[in-house]
Amino acid sequence: MSVSFKRNISPMFEVYQANMNWRFDLGKYEDVKLNAVKIYQMIETKQMPPPNYNPFSDDQIAMFKQWMDEDYPE
């Protein structure tokens, strides 16, 4: 099944968004798309989300990578 930003990626970040200070909006497609490689590196190495939150699951990380590999469907 294909992955979309609206259905799969944006909801991954909703719980963290209010407490994260980023130079871009994790809820905006264009912002996440433009920063996807950096975001992926951070979630893969468990640098994101912050330590007081549970890290993304392996399935969530794989889904984010799939979204990138599928050329960032909205």
Image (spheres, helix red, strand yellow):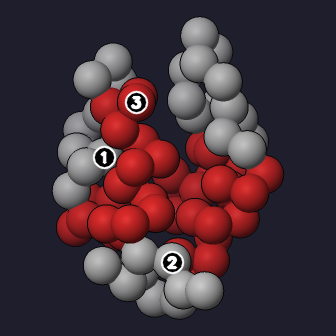
Which residue: 62% across, 77% down?
Answer: 66
Which label sits in the foreground, 3 or 1? 3
What is the distance, in whole Å, between disc 2 and disc 1 at their CAs?
17 Å
Q: Residues within 10 Å of mark 1 (few under 14, many from 20)?
A: many
Q: Position of residue 57 (x, y in %)?
A: 73, 44
Where, by quadrant of the figure, is residue 46 drawn?
Answer: top right
In the image, residue 59 above or below residue 5: above
Q: Amino acid at mark 3?
A: Val
As drawn, the residue found furthest toward the right would be 58
Q: Amino acid at mark 2?
A: Val
The residue at 68%/31% (across/down) is 55
The one of 35 and 19 positioned closer to us in this rendering: 19
Asked if the residue under mark 1 is in contact with the one under mark 2, i.e. CB atoms within 8 Å, the reply is no
Please give the label number shown on residue 15: 3
> Which of the 4 quarters of the picture holds residue 28?
bottom left
Q: Is residue 20 above or below residue 2?
A: above
User: Which is more toward the observer, 71 or 14?
Assistant: 14
Question: Does residue 31 lie above or below 55 as drawn?
Answer: below
The residue drawn where x is 38% and y is 66% is: 7
- Closer to the chain start, of discs 2 and 3, is 2
Q: What amino acid is found at the position of numbered circle 1 in the picture?
A: Leu
Q: Position of residue 42 (x, y in %)?
A: 60, 44
The residue under the point 31% across, 66% down is 6
Q: Which mark is residue 52?
A: none
Disc 1: which residue: 26
**Residue closest to the eye, 3 or 38:** 3
Quadrant holding the N terminus = bottom right
Disc marking residue 3: 2
Q: CA distance from mark 2 to mark 3?
A: 19 Å
Please report whichever mark, 3 or 1, sits nearer to the chain's N-terminal start: 3
